[in-house]
Image: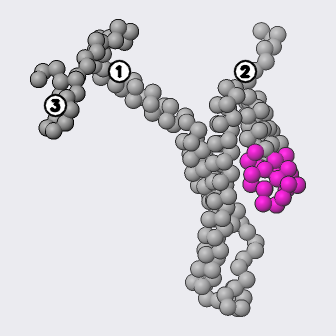
Amino acid sequence: MSSSNSQPGGPVIPQASFPPLPFIPRFPPRPPLTEEEIIMRQMQFGEEFWKSCPMKSVMAGVAGFVLGGAFSLLMGSMAYDVPVGLGGRPISDLPLREQMRAQFKDLGGRMWSSAKSFGKIGGIFAGVECSIEALRAKNDIWNGIAAGCLTGGALAIKSGPQGALSGCAAFAAFSGAIDLYMRREERPPAETDED
């Protein structure tokens, strides 16, 4: 039985043959990529990867974490408020090694707290600004102002609506001022008549 299938003990099922569909285009096989094309595609992929919003957010968060820790280290080394002491004893009565241990422990806690805060701010701000820029398809000062407002509001949301509005306004103003300053530096100098 060439035109039908038969199963042992079952009915005979005829096989239908359909002609190939005429509207499906038949493309010739694509030639293999050259080494230069492979390298160019890899470079384009790498560039798109590093310019993506999640990657910008991660990089800004890591940079904020490092800079926040360094800033706290610098400010902590100049701080006048020293830890009160250990076990109720003033720190000046402790041996030098214990004094150093208490101060480094306090400085480490401050560095960790500051690094986390700066990292969070940097990551949120960069991610929001990149997303707004992608949505608007524009690169102007309003992206930074909107991102500053959203970041400030999000970070201050736990303090209620008034705190969120204050955070929004403060971050937006700071971001706008920084953006204005940075864009001023990018403009070419004005032409003068002194030639």
The nearer-to-camera label among 2 and 1 is 1
* Residue lying farthest to the left in this orientation: 1
Q: Main secondary structure of the magenta part?
A: helix
Identify the residue shown where x is 67% and y is 91%: 87
- Name above or below for residue 153 compared with residue 159: above
- Residue 131 seen anywhere in this rendered image of the structure: yes
Q: Which residues are magenta?
A: 150-170
As helix, strand or loop, the secondary structure at mark 1 comes to helix
Q: Position of residue 174 (x, y in %)?
A: 80, 44
- Name above or below for residue 114 compared with residue 139: below
Identify the residue shown where x is 61% and y is 75%: 105
Q: Left or right: 150 with respect to 37?
A: right
Q: Which residue is mark 1?
A: 37
Q: Which residue is mark 2?
A: 188
Q: Which residue is mark 3?
A: 6
Q: CA distance from mark 1 to mark 3?
A: 53 Å
Residue 152 shown in magenta: yes
Mark 2 residue type: Pro
Mark 1 / mark 3, whichever is N-terminal: 3
- Name above or below for residue 147 compared with residue 41: below
Residue 157 shown in magenta: yes
Most foreground residue, 115 or 105: 115
Q: Position of residue 160 (x, y in %)?
A: 84, 58
* Residue lying farthest to the right in this orientation: 162
